Structure formats: structure tokens, C-alpha cells
């Protein structure tokens, strides 16, 4: 397979390049199912909390939720006893 841009090369270089031939093996562009599954399994995943991570409100909710749940469960148990 010869290049179509040989006319811009100097004559000596063009002659040397024409001495070489390259055989390109046929390439398969269709992926195997196992490759597609492996690509899917190894693809990076977005963190759904990334856009909330910088807010102080979310951190406060995370810290207060166990306290509120503990108080709520304790009060519920006391009311039903």
C-alpha cells in the first residue's frame, strides 16, 4: 500500500520508503461478549453523593440521624409500654 502524499517528499527519501512493504493483518472490530461484560464491570461509576459532599447540611444530617432515630425509638418504646 503506497502513500498518496509521496509527491511532497524528496526523491531520495521516496525511493528508500518504497523499498519497504508492510503487511497489515485483518483487524476484528467486533468485541466478544466477555470483553463487553468485562468493560461494563470495570467501568468507573459516579458517586451519587458527590454533588452533596461539599455541603455542611448533609454532614449535619448524617451526624444527627442516628441521634434522632435513637430518641424516636426510645420514646416510641416508652409510649407503648
Image (cartoon, helix red, strand yellow):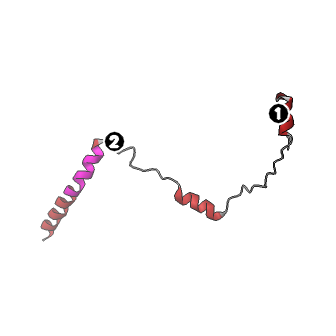
Location of residue 35 with respect to 5 vertically, above or below: below
Query: In the picture, which quadrant includes the C terminus?
Result: bottom left
**Residue 63, percent across and down?**
23, 51
Which is more foreground, mark 2 or mark 1? 1
Q: Residue at x 74, y 57 (%)?
A: 28
Q: Are marks 2 and 1 in contact (CB under 8 Å)?
A: no
Residue at the image position 42 percent from the left and 50 percent from the top: 48
User: Looking at the image, is 63 positioned above or below residue 2?
Assistant: below
Give the quadrant of the N terminus.
top right
Q: Residue 25 at what x, y percent from top left? A: 78, 55
* Residue 34 sits inside the magenta stretch: no
* Circle 2 Cα neighbour tier, 10 Å, few/some/many (<14 / 14–19 / ≥20): few
Q: Which mark is residue 47?
A: none
In the picture of the structure, the residue carrying the numbered disc 2 is 54
Decide: few, some or many residues near mark 1? Use Cα within 10 Å; few <14, some 14-19, many ≥20: few
Q: Is residue 66 magenta?
A: yes
The secondary structure making up most of the magenta span is helix
- Work out whether residue 11 can be spotted: yes
Judging by the rendered image, the residue that carries numbered circle 1 is: 13
Residue at 75% across, 55% down: 27
Residue most extreme to the bottom? 81
Left or right of 51 on screen, residue 39: right
Q: Nearer the viewer, residue 5 or 34?
A: 5
Along the line of sight, the residue nearer the viewer: 78 or 18:
18
Instruction: Classify 16 as above or below 41.
Output: above
Which span is picked out in magenta? 57-67
Amino acid at each position: 500500500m503506497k502513500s498518496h502524499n509521496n509527491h511532497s517528499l524528496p526523491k531520495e527519501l521516496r525511493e528508500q520508503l518504497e523499498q519497504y512493504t508492510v503487511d497489515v493483518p485483518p483487524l476484528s472490530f467486533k468485541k466478544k461478549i466477555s470483553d463487553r461484560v468485562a468493560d461494563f464491570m470495570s467501568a468507573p461509576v459516579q458517586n451519587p453523593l458527590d454533588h452533596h459532599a461539599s455541603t455542611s447540611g448533609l454532614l449535619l444530617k448524617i451526624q444527627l440521624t442516628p441521634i434522632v432515630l435513637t430518641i424516636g425509638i426510645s420514646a416510641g418504646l416508652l409510649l407503648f409500654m
